[in-house]
Image (cartoon, grey):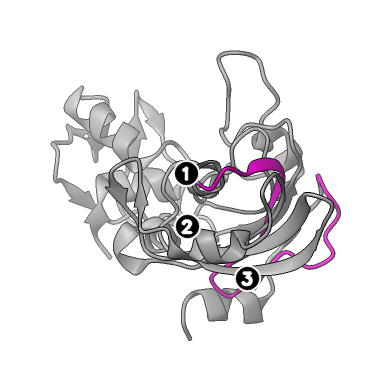
Amino acid sequence: MEERLQKILSAAGVCSRRAAEGYIKAGRVSVNGETAGLGGKADPDRDEIRLDGALLCRRKEPVYILLNKPRGYVTTLSDEKGRKTVAELVAGCGVRVYPVGRLDLDSEGLLLLTNDGALAQRLTHPGHEVEKTYHVWVRGPVEGAAERLSRLTDLEGEPIRPARVETLRQGDGRAKLAVTIHQGKNRQVRRMCAACGLEVVRLRRVREHTLGLGSLPPGKWRYLTAEELAALRGR
């Protein structure tokens, strides 16, 4: 079945869709010996697709990985500053997979990685408003913090959907909260806490859509089960 070339390159683990568009515009992609144009399509199971003259591997079975990201790792495949990346943690899977969304350097927890560009797009598209739940350890004026956080509808002039916030533990100027958001704007949970005068001590994502972190140890990964994948796809 024919698909857009940028989708094929992304699904093959060569690059992101955005990068693929640049490759196509630069004339680096060919289909059956002809230089491809932006918007071009091909059948990855039938056509000969090349990038810089190198034959693109035929379609591989998609891989879906759940990683418990530790603090101190950046959510990229490579880092120009030489920092540790999540790609190093999942290198043993033997396939180039891409992070679905982000967790910043100091955040930890559930991170999905895959070479299935269609599912990644579905989970990260703002219009789908996929729920994400974080456990957040904070200190400061914690009395009534859950209520204050749940009432926030604006971050520095940027509108946000109200979050669901639950106090899991509280005492001595510290609290552990469960915060569920629907949009995932840049550093949203940390910015929400700062707006309420709270200092984030630790932040861990424990759920995304139907997928839970469970008891997976930090720095470890596993493949998704068939049941988990079906739930993510809404089947």
Q: Residue furthest bottom?
A: 235
Query: Mark 2 near mark 1, Cβ–Cβ under 8 Å?
Result: no
The N terminus, quarter of image: bottom left
Given the image, on which type of amino acid does mark 3 rest? Answer: Leu
Residue 66 image point, x, y percent: 68, 58
Q: Is residue 39 left or right of residue 130?
A: left
Are there few (<14), some (14-19), or many (20+) residues within 10 Å of tag 1? some
Given the image, on which type of amino acid does mark 2 rest? Answer: Asp
> Dot 2: what SS?
loop
Q: Which residue is mark 2?
A: 116
Q: Is residue 138 magenta?
A: no
Q: Which residues are magenta?
A: 196-219
Residue 23 image point, x, y percent: 27, 28
The structure residue drawn at horizontal position 38% and vertical position 63%, both measured from the top left corner, is 122
Q: Give residue 211's mark.
A: 3
Q: Is residue 149 left or right of residue 91?
A: left
Calculate the distance from the C-alpha at mark 3 to the C-alpha at mark 2: 16 Å
Q: Which residue is mark 1?
A: 57
Q: Is residue 199 magenta?
A: yes
Image quadrant where residue 52 sits? top left
Q: Is residue 36 left or right of residue 87?
A: left
Q: Can the viewer see residue 45?
A: no
> Dot 1: what SS?
loop
Give above or below for 38 relative to 135.
above
Q: Nearer the viewer, mark 3 or mark 2?
A: 3
Calculate the distance from the C-alpha at mark 2 to the C-alpha at mark 1: 15 Å
